[in-house]
Image: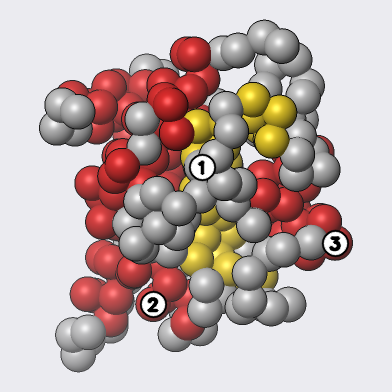
Amino acid sequence: MTDHPELREVVALSSRIMAAAGSGDFIWGHVSARDPEGRGVWLKQASWGLEEITPEKVHLVSPGGEVLLGGGQRHSEYPIHAEVMAARPDVGGVVHVHSRYAVALAAAGEELRPMSHEANYFAPLGVPRFTQTADLILTSELGQSVAETLGRAEALFLVNHGVVVVGPDLPTATVAAVVLDRACRQQLVTRGFDGAPTWSDDEESLAKREHIYGGRAVGQVWDYLVRQLPAL
């Protein structure tokens, strides 16, 4: 069976970037890359923290949850990855983490507003809210509901749980997940002051997205985040 060491490496880098960005949660949280042969996803193994992931701790998981290559313990929430990939052929990478500020903003009932450069990344669809359950996404049915609520957006709040962030590839999804938590943090800080918060209207928000994140910018941010990782 064909291995893809380059995807193992990307999953490992993404995992460690999410940990370095403050989204680690003991052994929980996981990222995946779509298998180019249609066999499923290359997924971080369970029982390890995000910061511990090397290519050897990444395995290939089928849409039904079978570990096809790489051994190790599979995350129970693999349906997030399997069902989002099934519903979104344009998605090549999925990040599910329990980012502190994103969890806080979603639990507070706040809609993400373009109060900062970061929040404009998610224009024009914003970040929908999944409220069917705050429990783990353990079944295909729940995974399908997550994918349906995500729709065509690039990120989803699992309210009182975490986030699901997607991209055409895993580096893009990783950058978006880091940007999302920064946006949530800025909004919470802003709301903490007495005053009248302001944010960009739809037209300006779309323009800022293109000006800040267009072209090669997202790839360059990924390269920057990789450079900041300590050597293993």
Q: Is residue 75 above or below residue 101?
A: above
**Residue farthest top in this picture:** 2
The residue singled out by tag 1 in the image is: 45
Helix, strand or loop for disc 3:
helix
Which residue is at 24% across, 75% downward?
190
Marks 1/2: CA–CA distance = 27 Å
x%, y% of residue 57?
45, 34
The residue under label 3 is 141
- Mark 3 or 2: the one toward you: 3
Disc ID at residue 162:
none
Categorize mark 3 by other alpha carbons within 10 Å: few (<14), some (14-19), many (20+).
few
The residue lying toward the viewer, choosing from 95 and 196, is 95
The image shows residue 130 at horizontal and vertical percentages of 66, 70
At label 2, the amino acid type is Ala
Say which amino acid is labelled 1.
Gln
Residue 179 drawn above or below residue 223: below
For residue 104, which numbered disc appears in the image? 2
Q: Decide which of 162, 186 is in the foreground and name it.
A: 162
Q: In the shown orientation, is residue 121 left or right of residue 132?
A: left
**Nearest-to-viewer mark from 3 and 1:** 1
Disc with the residue nearer the chain's start (3 vs 1): 1
Q: Residue at x 45, y 59 (%)?
A: 28
Within 10 angstroms of label 2, few (less than 14), some, or many (20 or more) residues?
Answer: many
Quadrant in which residue 132 is drawn: bottom right
Q: What amino acid type should be assigned to the residue bearing mark 3?
A: Glu
Question: How far across and down, in percent of the image, does residue 19 sit?
Answer: 29, 49
